[in-house]
Image (cartoon, rainbow, N blue to C red):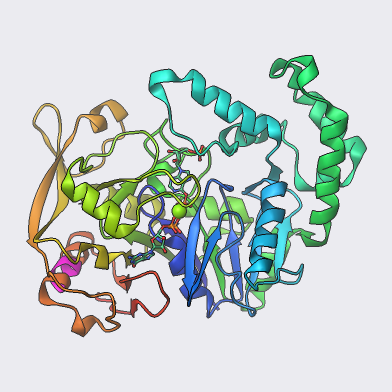
């Protein structure tokens, strides 16, 4: 029996979907514990490309049950659409295969509209949100004004909750009709009903029965509302601690915390990014890495690997191991840089990620330069077969972080993976 958390150690899009899919082969349950359909997890199996936003990346295995737990904000229309898309791709999602928490908060039209409205009012200080209503849905949750999945089961309950949200403060009176909203969301509720359950009870029973459980984080550590580059963050806690709250399990049940780490760095949306490359190297990473958002299609900002934030992610998540992804994207570089420290505006060398965004924004990276390997590693499955310079790159990360690297991903497909090169 093992319970493991998979978290993004950077700004999201580290390849969590692929790693979760691989580990799900030997798991009984995969649980999403936070975020919503701001996430985009691409999983490639054979010729099929699955783009998952809400449904956990374990869904592709018949033997694995997927769970959308209480910490997630769930947009019912997106959820039903995703099930339909999966059905068309040959994956039939029955209530046996998927559970949703009765107490997960629901994303409503007001949340999407508020998200876009707030973003347009920010003018020069945009966050670059995905526009999916995530921030406003979590705001209502924390303000104790949210609608939960179970509330969709009764038109009366739903109407009472919607009235408390004061939609007239957001819309002109002619622009919304709460009766229509109640009818629509009640009808969604009827479709969600077969999947609805007490997921905390369900997961804890599974753990007690000795099952293998993966808790799948969305987004990444630097997008965490507490620990990330606030305010350029999402509105939930992707870090491993969020898994306990978002799934309703105790911390002592978690055995492993796996940090999915891209071999370089990307960020979508606004906010500081110390190692960003606004040059041909950045363009090369974007093109070779296919760095365009799964959810919004936006080009991702690209840069060199930053060990300062990786060490920070190791600390705040308590990472027990790392899965290094997209190493193949670095195949063509003559030289590869890794940021080991920052230099502050005052010239001070910093080992640790500074929590003051003003200070952080003005840091410049201190790099070490390693030689590239200039060969195609995308078909390799054994660590021993990696070119020497690729091994040096991996060893460099291990030596600086002291966290075992459990897996190296060298392509989008399941077989393009080097397993268990753990060094301690
Ligand atoms: P997630 O949000 O963390 O699940 O990551 P995304 O799915 O948004 O982005 C990762 C992208 O890289 C996806 O298109 C994956 O198919 C792809 N990918 C994952 N691992 C690798 C890898 O090792 N090499 C390459 N070239 N692509 C990868
Ligand atoms: P996955 O799970 C990368 C970013 C947005 C924006 C900020 C806030 O695929 O790694 P939000 O809509 O959440 O209020 O936007 O967070 N963001 C992501 N960036 N990957 C994601 O998810 C993201 N989810 C949100 O671009 O900067
Ligand atoms: Mg993604």
Residue 335 vs residue 201: left or right? left
Q: Is residue 214 above or below residue 146?
A: below
Please provide the residue range marked out in magenta. 391-395
Q: Is residue 10 above or below residue 327?
A: above
Q: Is residue 122 above or below residue 348?
A: above
x then y, percent, for residue 58:
57, 69
x then y, percent, for residue 74:
67, 47
User: Quadrant of the rendered structure where residue 248 is?
Assistant: bottom right
Residue 423 visible in image: yes
Task: Report the residue at 17% width, 50% height from top.
Answer: 281
Task: Report the residue at 47% width, 70% height from top.
Answer: 44
Q: In this view of the protein, which residue sits in the foreground, 217 or 123?
A: 123
Residue 202 vs residue 351: left or right? right
Residue 239 vs residue 409: left or right? right
x then y, percent, for residue 178:
84, 28
Q: Is residue 212 above or below residue 310?
A: below
> Which quarter shows the C terminus?
bottom left
Q: In this view of the protein, which residue sits in the foreground, 219 or 177?
A: 177
> Residue 143 colored magenta?
no
User: Quadrant of the rendered structure where residue 169 is?
Assistant: top right
> Residue 394 colored magenta?
yes
């Amino acid at each position: 029996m093992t319970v493991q958390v998979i978290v993004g150690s950077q700004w999201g899009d580290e390849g969590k979907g692929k790693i979760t899919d691989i580990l799900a082969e030997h798991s009984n349950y995969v649980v999403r514990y936070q975020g919503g359909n701001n996430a985009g997890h691409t999983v490639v199996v054979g010729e099929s490309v699955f783009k998952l936003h809400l449904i956990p990346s374990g869904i592709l295995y018949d033997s694995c049950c997927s769970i959308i737990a209480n910490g997630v904000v769930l947009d019912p229309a997106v959820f039903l659409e995703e099930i339909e898309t999966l059905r068309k791709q040959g994956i039939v999602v029955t209530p046996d295969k998927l559970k949703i928490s009765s107490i997960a908060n629901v994303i409503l039209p007001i949340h999407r509209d508020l998200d876009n409205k707030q973003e347009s009012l920010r003018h020069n200080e945009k966050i670059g949100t995905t526009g999916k209503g995530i921030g406003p849905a979590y705001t209502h949750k924390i303000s104790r004004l949210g609608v939960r999945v179970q509330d969709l089961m009764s038109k009366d309950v739903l109407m009472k909750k919607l009235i408390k949200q004061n939609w007239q403060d957001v819309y002109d009176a002619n622009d919304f009709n709460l009766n229509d909203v109640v009818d629509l969301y009640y009808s969604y509720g009827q479709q969600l009903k077969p999947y609805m359950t007490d997921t905390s009870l369900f997961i804890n029973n599974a753990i007690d029965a000795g099952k293998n459980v993966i808790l799948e984080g969305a987004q990444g550590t630097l997008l965490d509302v507490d620990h990330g580059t606030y305010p350029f963050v999402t509105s939930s806690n992707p870090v491993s601690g969020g898994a306990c709250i978002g799934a309703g399990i105790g911390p002592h049940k978690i055995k492993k915390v796996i940090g999915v780490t891209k071999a370089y760095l990307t960020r979508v949306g606004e906010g500081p990014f110390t190692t960003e490359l606004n040059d041909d190297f950045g363009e090369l990473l974007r093109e070779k890495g296919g760095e365009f958002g799964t959810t919004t299609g936006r080009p991702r900002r690209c840069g060199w690997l930053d060990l300062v934030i990786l060490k920070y992610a190791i600390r705040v998540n308590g990472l027990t191991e790392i899965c290094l992804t997209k190493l193949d994207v670095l195949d063509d570089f003559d030289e590869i840089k890794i940021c080991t420290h920052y230099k502050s505006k005052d010239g001070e060398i910093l080992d640790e990620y500074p929590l003051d965004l003003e200070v952080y924004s003005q840091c410049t990276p201190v790099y070490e330069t390693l030689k590239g390997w200039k060969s195609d590693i995308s078909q390799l499955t054994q660590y021993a077969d990696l070119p020497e310079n690729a091994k040096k790159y991996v060893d460099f990360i291990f030596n600086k972080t002291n966290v075992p690297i459990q897996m190296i991903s060298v392509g989008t497909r399941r077989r393009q993976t080097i397993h268990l090169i753990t060094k301690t």
